Image (cartoon, grey):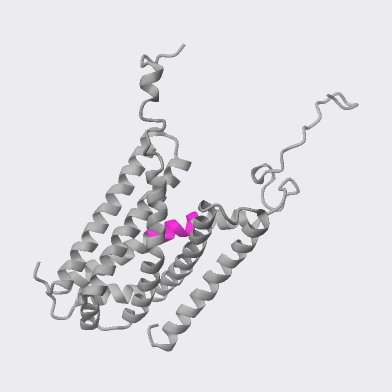
């Protein structure tokens, strides 16, 4: 089909994220379930690094067994306790609680419940809210018990 | 024209329902269930040990309950994250060589780090006897 000028008319595009980009009218609508889906993977990868840090802690603890000043362990804990280390630990806390809550969502879906749009949107908000609340609670407890 | 000389049956073997297709999927979910209590326990462990001195940390990890839970956490978490990242690699990387290298690297990293962690936990828990 052509218009009056004879040039081929642009065909309507599918309203997909990649056809227009963020904020484009071509993007149908941003759904919270899109965020929770990709955030599950992102936090999973973050926790991969967190688990390696945990392994490093165990190795540093064992490496310091024969040291009189436990220098290896002290250096490792100083690294984790530095401003950058604390930032990483805060991100890992958020990732742990988010991945846990969203993981429970996935287990619910695998069991065949909560798959309708209304439930999925509700549990998405609940998972994010839980992650934020639990992270603040843990860092609050850490601050009160002198762990920071 | 296809240059594939294998028979259609040969190509299909091992790819279809061999009655174990769901095992990997189920194991990832079972490990997720186990990680719920283990991770919550670990979070409190981190708060407990963040500012503790070296001897306190050693004594904490040397207690049988903490040592066993920590080893279980390492085993289950490392297995779970290996399968999770494996799926991510399989989803996004389609070049055969790159995909293979990343999958093997993923397996080797978790195996090495997991083995180092478990040996270290045992060494601390058994009072440096190993």
Does A9 appear above or below A88? above
Numbered-mark total: 0
Q: Position of residue A77 (x, y in %)?
A: 30, 75
Quarter of image, res A63? bottom left
Q: Position of residue A25 (x, y in %)?
A: 76, 48
Camera-nearest residue between A10 and A62: A62
Does B93 appear above or below B38? above
Does A120 appear above or below A97? above
Quarter of image, res A53? bottom left
Q: Residue at x 81, y 30 (%)?
A: A9
- Range shown magenta: A41-48
Q: Which secondary structure class fits the magenta region best?
A: helix
Quadrant assignment for the C terminus of chain B: bottom left
Farthest right residue in view: A4
Camera-nearest residue between A129 and B65: B65
Q: Residue at x 24, y 54 (%)?
A: B112
Q: Position of residue A86 (x, y in %)?
A: 41, 74
Q: Position of residue A47 (x, y in %)?
A: 41, 61
Task: Tell whether A84 sits left or right of A60.
Answer: right
Task: Tell whether A69 sits left or right of A135.
Answer: left
Queried whether the magenta region covers residue B63, the answer comes back as no
Farthest top residue in view: B1
Q: Residue at x 11, y 72 (%)?
A: B128
Queried whether the magenta region covers residue A45, the answer comes back as yes
């Amino acid at each position: 089909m052509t218009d009056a000028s004879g040039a081929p008319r642009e065909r309507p595009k599918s309203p997909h994220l990649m056809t227009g980009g963020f904020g484009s009218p071509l993007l149908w609508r941003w759904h919270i379930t899109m965020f929770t889906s990709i955030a599950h993977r992102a936090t999973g990868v973050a926790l991969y690094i967190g688990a390696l840090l945990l392994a490093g802690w165990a190795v540093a603890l064992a490496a310091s067994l024969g040291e009189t000043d436990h220098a290896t362990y002290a250096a490792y804990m100083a690294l984790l306790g530095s401003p950058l280390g604390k930032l990483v630990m805060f991100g890992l806390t958020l990732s742990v609680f988010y991945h846990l809550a969203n993981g429970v969502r996935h287990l619910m879906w695998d069991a065949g419940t909560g798959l309708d749009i209304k439930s999925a949107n509700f549990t998405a908000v609940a998972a994010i809210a839980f992650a934020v609340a639990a992270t603040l609670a843990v860092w609050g407890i850490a601050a009160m018990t002198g762990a920071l | 024209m296809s240059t594939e000389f294998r028979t259609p049956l040969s190509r299909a073997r091992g790819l279809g329902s061999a009655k174990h297709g769901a095992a990997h999927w189920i194991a990832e979910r079972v490990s997720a269930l186990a990680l719920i209590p283990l991770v919550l326990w670990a979070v409190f462990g981190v708060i407990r040990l963040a500012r503790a001195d070296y001897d306190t940390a050693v004594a904490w990890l040397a207690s049988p309950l903490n040592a066993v839970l920590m080893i279980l956490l390492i085993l289950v978490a490392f297995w779970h994250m290996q399968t999770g990242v494996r799926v991510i690699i399989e989803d996004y990387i389609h070049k055969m060589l790159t995909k293979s290298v990343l999958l093997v690297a993923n397996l080797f990293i978790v195996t090495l780090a997991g083995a180092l962690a478990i040996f270290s936990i045992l060494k601390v828990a058994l009072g440096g006897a190993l």
